[in-house]
Image (cartoon, rainbow, N blue to C red):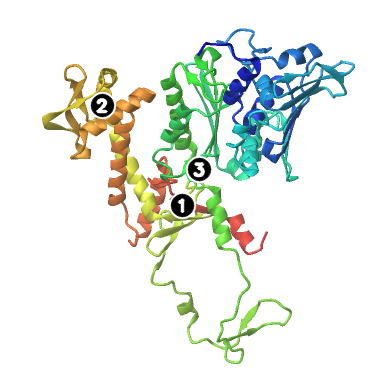
Amino acid sequence: MPIKQLSETLINQIAAGEVIERPASAAKELIENALDAGATRIEIATAGGGKTLLRVTDNGSGMSPEDLEMAVRRHCTSKLDSGLADIRTLGFRGEALPSIGSVAKLTISSRTSGAAQGSQISIVGGKLEPVRPAAANNGTVVEVRDLFFATPARLKFMKTEKAEASAISEVVRRMAIAFPHVRFVLSGSDRTTLEFAATGNDRLARIAQVLGRDFRDNAIEIDAEREGVHLTGFAGVPTFNRGNSLQQYAFVNGRPVQDKLIWSALRAAYAETIPQGRYPVAVLSLTIDPDLVDVNVHPAKSDVRFRDPGLVRGLIIGAIRQGLAQHGDRASTTGASGLMRAFRPEPPRPAANWNAATSPYRPASFDGTAAFAFREAPQQSFQEMAAPSARTQMVEPAPQGEATPEPLHPLGAARAQLHENYIVAQTADGLVIVDQHAAHERLVFEHLRKGLNSRSIPAQALLIPEIVDLAEDDCDRLIAHAEEFSRLGLGIERFGPGAIAVRETPAMLGEMDAAGLVRQLADELAEWDTASGLSSRLEYLAATMACHGSVRSGRRMRPEEMNALLRQMEATPGSGQCNHGRPTYIELKLSDIERLFGRS
């Protein structure tokens, strides 16, 4: 077949397949244009999940009639003054509006400040209509109707209206977090409205609007810088986690991104603090020289590439771990909320065989209250009734001054042990309930991990070295990290072209698949230029040893042992959760207890 030039309409439709995947993609592009225009108020209206109608209204700078005519042409933009090496705007490719116009019915109305009237332009399935005068407020209104009507095959791949509307909502949430000074309003055909009022420079207040007020109470502020890369944001305490990753947000120079490197670093930072299958809640923002990051990886602009990925990954892991070590050793406030719900009082109900004539209790009054008074001496003495059960150990105050909890002791003084597993301690302003096994498990693990990090790991020499065949590039990367591996107990060296000889393995791991470990390390180095697999495996073994070597559930502890455990928890980083990510204690403030009894 002879080669021929594609028509402009077909070229735009092909481009639309890359830029506009679904209604949420169109919403993202239009909101980015509004933000680049300096808008401080953006309203998004949808119908049919964005397929029938998508309207974005902003109070930005607006466009002149000449700008309107250029805006709907491919590769026309006002945002690339310094080329691709210095991109400081959200949009820059000049593809969104012509792509949308090629597959939908697009109308743009706009007016600049000081203009006598506005202007309007329309494109229907790629057919451009001339600019005409129109009534318009300052700013721009972009209306997209019948998305993909010109490409019916694409409509077959759209999800339900609810799913598409949810995707648009997620786009608005991400943009709202990135730009707290902008007011966002999203309305749908179901008459519901999602509104995020502007919070100015108070980014945490905006995040709380999006993620809920619980995040504010369970967030740790992150602020770190390394070699010109600045990381800010908030990370949730480990015990404040979720069953999916939907509440993880990342931004690079204000641009919402979905970047594998950032998500990998986030997982690594919480590696031994959150159970498998659970995800931390975090909002991270990177500020970096535009010349050191490529945002032109994909037309959707949601992927980025860093010139020094190791620097970025190390910064994220180090900053979050430092924040967790300093401020993350506390129980999630949602744990106390759950405890409050579990303790919610219910009206007392008499037993089925209760008899007023024979009961030792009788009503003290008949005014509808639940007050009771003794009628006659019960069969049991008061001392017998108040005696603790066989599984409750009351603790006498220790003679060393722990009778009254000191503010320097956040976990307070032990008062009782319940069911040989839970320590109840009185604090200066409430009480805490400690899971003794989970708490001691964490203490043992931290002791073992400190040993791993403070000295070289003992190695066991293999009687016969194991030869692992690998690609030449993988061998080069592994040998470059040979010194690091040696400190961890793994001795490797080159064995001719395309092979690695394993001569030593960590003694802690015992008999192991050395070849499998080396291949895993090679894969990690190829993708991230870091090799955390060996240290992670050693830490996993340390966690297993800690679990088996810690105080077991069902063991009765002496008062001094319980208080010693509390003091060690206060002095140990990460003691707020066990090695599996579960909380080691729950705190209940005195004000919460008073609310349970209706005192406040």
Q: Horizontal and vertical percent for residue 85? A: 55, 10
Quarter location, residue 63? top right
Residue appearing at x 32%, y 61% in the figure: 555
**Alpha-carbon span between mark 3 and mark 1:** 24 Å
Q: Can residue 208 be seen in this view?
A: no
Q: Name the residue under label 1.
A: 585
Amino acid type at mark 1: Tyr
Q: Horizontal and vertical percent for residue 435? A: 41, 55
Q: Which mark is residue 517?
A: none
Q: Can residue 239 be seen in this view?
A: yes
Q: Mark 3 points at which residue?
A: 244
Residue appearing at x 40%, y 42% in the figure: 572
* Contact flag, marks 2 and 1 (Cβ < 8 Å): no
Label 1 sits on a secondary structure element that is: strand
Residue placed most toward the observer, 235 or 400: 235
How many neighbours does mark 2 have within 10 angstroms: few (below 14), some (14-19), or many (20 or more)? many
Residue placed most toward the observer, 124 or 314: 124
Q: Horizontal and vertical percent for residue 76? A: 67, 12
Q: Horizontal and vertical percent for residue 60? A: 76, 22
Residue 224 vs residue 50: left or right?
A: left
Q: Which mark is residue 485?
A: 2
Label 2 sits on a secondary structure element that is: helix
How many neighbours does mark 3 have within 10 angstroms: few (below 14), some (14-19), or many (20 or more)? few
